[in-house]
Amino acid sequence: MGVRVPLALQEVLYDVSNERKGKNMSDAVEKSADQSEGKLNIFARTGLFYRQVVSELKKVVWPTREMLTTYTAVVLVFVAFIIAVVSIIDLVLTKVVFWVFG
């Protein structure tokens, strides 16, 4: 029981790490399926989990300082714009309600 990936996509979707060098994707899936059957104790499973977390974090493409600064500025400008729009709508609706109901 596992996900079947076409051979042409295996090379694209599967990044070969140092510990899996020379193995294909199905070997890794079978290995993880064997380990998930409960054969490992709690300490081995915890160690496996942290090794997998570190392995995945090595694959992350972290933003540069310039990118982070740009993205932060864009978010702050967008939030300020939305605050202004909601404030204007609130002001208009408040004036309309006071005008209608006195």
Image (tube, rainbow, N blue to C red):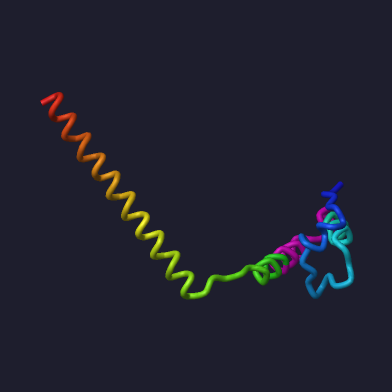
Q: Give the overall secondary structure of the magenta segment.
A: helix
Q: Quadrant of residue 23?
A: bottom right
Q: Is residue 17 magenta?
A: no
Judge from the rendering whether residue 76 lies leftward or rightward of residue 34; answer left or right: left
Q: Residue at x 27, y 49 (%)?
A: 84
Please provide percent x and percent y for residue 61. Answer: 61, 69
Q: Is residue 7 visible?
A: yes
What residue span does the magenta drawing correspond to?
A: 35-51
Q: Residue at x 84, y 70 (%)?
A: 20
* Residue 24 or residue 37, whichever sits in front: 24
* Residue 50 or residue 99, whichever sits in front: 99
Q: Quadrant of residue 93?
A: top left
Q: Is residue 75 above or below residue 69?
A: above
Please provide percent x and percent y for residue 28. Answer: 84, 61
Judge from the rendering whether residue 14 lies leftward or rightward of residue 93; answer left or right: right
Please provide percent x and percent y for residue 71. Answer: 45, 64
